[in-house]
Each structure stands twice: as C-alpha cells, then as structure tokens.
Image (cartoon, rainbow, N blue to C red):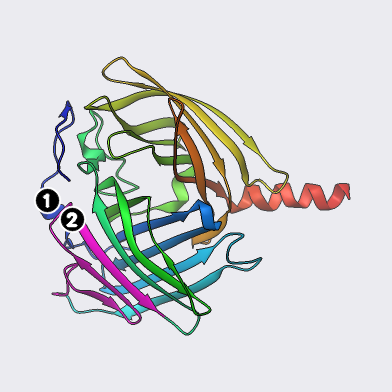
Amino acid sequence: MNRRYTTDIIALDPVHDNRHKLESGPFARESLAYLLQLPEEGIGGIVYTWVNGQGLAGCAVTLFGPGIGPEPLVDKLDGISVPEDMDFFDWRVERLHLKLGELLKTAHIHYKSDDFEIDFTFTATQPAYAYSSHKDGCPQWIAHDRFEQQGVQSGHIVIKGRRIPLRGYTQRDHSWGTRDWGVNQHWKWIHASAGPELSVHFWKLESMGQTLLRGYVDKDGHIAQVTDVDVEFAMNDDMTTRVVNADIVDSAGRITRFQGVPFATFYLSPDPMITLFESPITAHIDGQPGGGCCEVMWTNSLLDYVRGKKESAS
C-alpha cells in the first residue's frame, strides 16, 4: 500500500494482526475471514478460520456460485487442537495454511483438498479499520475488538483441473475476545471497492433493543467514520438478498451512494441460533463500478417461521 491519504480515524496497532491470548470462558474466540469474488466467473469464496479459549481451532473453506454449480464446494474442520505458541505467521489447521506477511499489509493462504485448491495472497489497499476507533468502541458481545480491511487478491484457484487466476477486489476481517451470537437479531454487513482509493464498509446491527452502526468511507484521499446509513433492501422469496443500496453519511459530511447486486449466496452457520447469508456482489460507488460482498444475518427461529408460513400457504 503506497498512497497518500488523510483520516480522522485512530490507527490500529499492527500487533493486532497476529494471534491474541484469549480468556477461557465459553464465548472466548478469535477468527479471521478472507473473502474472494470473481464476478466474471460467477464464483465467490470464503476462507474462515478460528480458535477458542481452549486452543481448539477450526476452519471453513468454500467456493460457490453459478461458476461452481448448484452445490457449493465446502470443507469444514473443527475441534483441532493447536499449540499455544502457534501464531498467524504460520497458522496450520490440517489442510489450511495461513501466513501473515508484513503486519496489516499482506497475508498468504494455501488450501488443498481432493475437490479444490486455493492459493491466495491478500495485499491491503488501505489501513485497517478497527471498531475500537469508533467513539462507542466495539460491541463487546461481538469482540473485544475487530478490524476490517480492503485489498486486492492474487494467486489462483483450481477446480476440476481448471486453474483460474485471482484478481480484483477482496476483503478480510479479524475479531478477537468474545463472540456471543445469540444476542443478535439481524445485521447487514457490506464491503465494496471501486478502486484502490474508493471503498466503503458499513455494519448495521440490531441487538438488545439497539441499532448500532460502524464503518468507514474511503474516497477523495480522505477516510472517515460512517455516521448514518439509509439502506434500501430487497429480498427474494427465500430471504436471500436481491439488491442492497444505501446512502452513506460520514464524519466529513459527505454522502456516498452505494449500490450492490448479489450474484450468489452461501449459507454459513457458525452457531445453531443464526445463519449468515454470504453474497458476493457487483457494486457501484458514486456511480463507479466495482465489487464486494454483502453479509446478512437472520435468526434461525425467524427463518423457520417464514419457511413454515410458506409451506402452509402452499
């Protein structure tokens, strides 16, 4: 990342790119997610790895979308004991190998199974955005702290002998401390980029009678906190996201127009109480074409209720 910018957001200490020492309670958790989007191929991907306070790790790796076929390629491992001193400079969960490069700037992931291979390099295009930089901090049931970061992807994926180069936009996040999934009713989480110096992130969460908002806008050489988001959201009959648009207001007084259309959805269930609808998107930011991802969280009780109503009506 070699660019000039101004910002009113407090910088994150690079040490937080690496593994943290967790408490031993039932909600202690650290996780990293790397997201892949290849809209021209109709392919999305997720590499997700975690570890709890007892030193038990796991990972979920998937490729999905119309370029993969009706069924996603998925591999999930959990309950893998890892050494206390193993960090993210050389993180191994059986078939998954993650290596941080320069902190908060680069990372490399290699994964290979009988079904597919991912050789992925993340290169940051902006500083990491920490939720602790917000005036109200990071919601503590989500994490002690968490950061989001835009970047570009390189490397390749291999599917059925076909090698597809990775290029274009990508995103990653990293949370550490606690994770209590059960207190969340709903959220919309958006990352999108239309170039190395034009990107947005917002996370709008409904929980415990509150509406919380975190995020940033990076444009015109200035990175600012998101202060308000007016979201236009439409769903398909199965509750997948059809379109999500938003007018985003930031602490510099700017309004940024975001428009996103998903081209695939993967259902990620990290806890029995909730499901995350993960959708790579084609996007526009202030009219400039780009791409990114949209994650929508629904409680499983609501999903069961809606599906039950549809079955009764039919």
Name the spot of residue 26 as percent of width and height, x first.
33, 63
Q: Residue furthest bottom?
A: 114
Which residue sits at x=22%, y=41%? 126
* Spatial CA span between label 2 and label 1: 6 Å
Apparent side of residue 253 relative to residue 68 in the rendered image (left or right): left
Q: Is residue 294 magenta?
A: no
Please give the residue where the numbered disc 1 appears in the rendered image: 14
- Quadrant in the rendering for residue 255: top left
Q: Residue furthest top?
A: 253
Decide: marks 2, 1 in contact (CB < 8 A)? Answer: yes
Which residue sits at x=53%, y=30%? 245
Name the spot of residue 118 as percent of width and height, x first.
39, 71
Asked whether 181 or 191 is in front, the reply is 191
Apparent side of residue 35 relative to residue 310 in the rendered image (left or right): left
Give the total number of marks visible in the rendering.
2
- Quadrant in the rendering for residue 23: bottom left
Name the spot of residue 30 as percent of width and height, x first.
28, 60
Which residue sits at x=27%, y=40%? 138
Q: Sort mark 2 into few (<14), some (14-19) or many (20+) by Cα contacts within 10 Å.
A: many
Q: Is residue 108 magenta?
A: yes
Name the spot of residue 27 as percent of width and height, x first.
33, 59
Which contiguous range is marked in magenta? 85-112
Q: Is residue 153 visible?
A: yes
Please give the residue where the numbered disc 2 appears in the rendered image: 17
- Quadrant in the rendering for residue 46: bottom left
Which residue sits at x=17%, y=74%? 86
Q: Is residue 63 above or below residue 175?
A: below
Name the amino acid, label 1. Pro
